[in-house]
Amino acid sequence: MAQVMEFKLPDLGEGLTEAEIVRWLVAVGDVVAVDQPVVEVETAKAMVEVPCPYGGVVTARFGEEGTELPVGAPLITVAVGAGAADAAAVAGAGEGAEPEAAGSGNVLVGYGTDHSRPARRRRVRPGSAAPAPAPAAASRPVAAAPVAAAAPAPVAAAAPAPVAAAGPAAAPSTGPVPVISPLVRKLARDHGIDLRALRGSGPEGLILRADVEAALKAPAVAPAPAAVAPVAAAGERIPLKGLRGAVADKLSRSRREIPDATCWVDADATELMAARAAMNAAGGPKVSVLALLARICTAALARYPELNSTVDLAANEIVRLPAVHLGFAAQTERGLVVPVVRDAQGRSAESLTAEFARMTELARTGKLAPSDLTGGTFTLNNYGVFGVDGSTPIINHPEAAMLGVGRIVPKPWVHRGELAVRQVVQLSLTFDHRVCDGGAAGGFLRYVADCVESPAVLLRSL
């Protein structure tokens, strides 16, 4: 007999507690292989395809596209082993056994085979309500249609409003539905009956055909009149969730916790642009302006390590970090993300250029892993690409500083005592005033500006 395995939303890492279903990659009745992606979800950090550690027939899916599920909520059930097609027909009737040690062993974070514990089996009897971490609406299967052996049935469309429940009280809205007969399920589905709202008259609350027929004959219960709500302001309402919600939370926390200050300076970038042109003319991989600025930042952080730190509020300590994990702001269709280049202090301008290009492409296609978006120690924000000169950046919590770079444009500038047209850029440094005072922040920014104006200054630190 087939074993019905329940696959739950795994821990996707980096403290993420929920994810939104973007697109289902399988339907009820589909045959899936071990580690085949079954759903695409969006976390607060990235888009992720979630692979299922079980192989077999999909018997149920939990959650509509656009639904947010907490970590640990059911995603799908899979009938594994002999009789899988028959198990698919009852689609979550609670008859299968669930061996928890089965699976591929491959994990994202927090799911897969755990060989440290002996295998055990758990049988769910009809009428018993198993606890589920997901909310009632999210825990309900999207479809549980009977599946023919020859061809899988399509996923059922959204059902109309359910008819009033039979019996003195409604059954719990979570856990397995106490129904064995697929004919009873089909009768309920064809007439829009929510089986979870019925109380069965069979043994241990088993829902019988007579219970469904009684519900069909019962008059529909009119909804209670709702209290008159105040008229809301007109306009489009956009849920503050997913990536936008995560950005809002982080920026709000930064403003609440960090006493930030900003200093800025205009710099003559003419020599830097000339040096870049000479590098690229010499052959080999091209070097970007962002990579040169990143290389200048890592040299400046070596001189002013206070700015490559974080504040541990629990211990009431400043923690100076040994490596520079450099974040850089990248605008995508999903919104602003900050990929992180690990150990940037040991990379050349060519290496930084290649890594920026690689991670920017991953960001634009939504393929950055959550680990690519966390762990930064300092952020470089080039808002000049938007055609603006200056800004006061908000620190990327829990970092201690961010350098903002405006556009590089021709401007009148006094050069060697004479007025000339030079390539000028504005540099802005926002810093956590707890980790350093204005002297260190000003020294850092002045060193960056000196390297921009005279790239030969950087050679002394190479």
Image (tube, grey):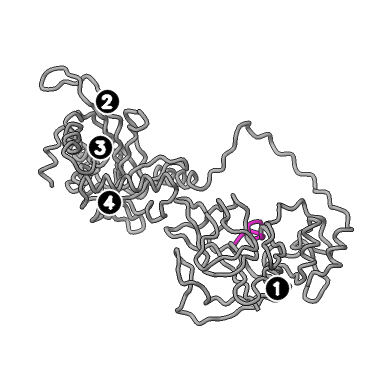
Foreground tag (1 vs 3)? 3
Residue 309's disc number: 4
Give the residues drawn in magenta, as a range: 134-141
Q: Nearer the viewer, residue 14 or 282?
A: 282
Disc 4 element: strand
Mark 1–mark 3 distance (CA, rounded to whole Å): 64 Å
Mark 4–mark 2 distance (CA, rounded to whole Å): 33 Å
Disc 1 element: loop
Question: Would you say residue 154 sits in the magenta stretch?
Answer: no
Residue 109: name its quadrant: bottom left
**Chain-order first, disc 4 or disc 2:** 4
Foreground tag (4 vs 2)? 2
**Chain-order first, disc 4 or disc 3:** 3
Q: What residue is shown with label 2?
A: 409
Foreground tag (2 vs 1)? 2
Tell me which amino acid carries mark 3. Val
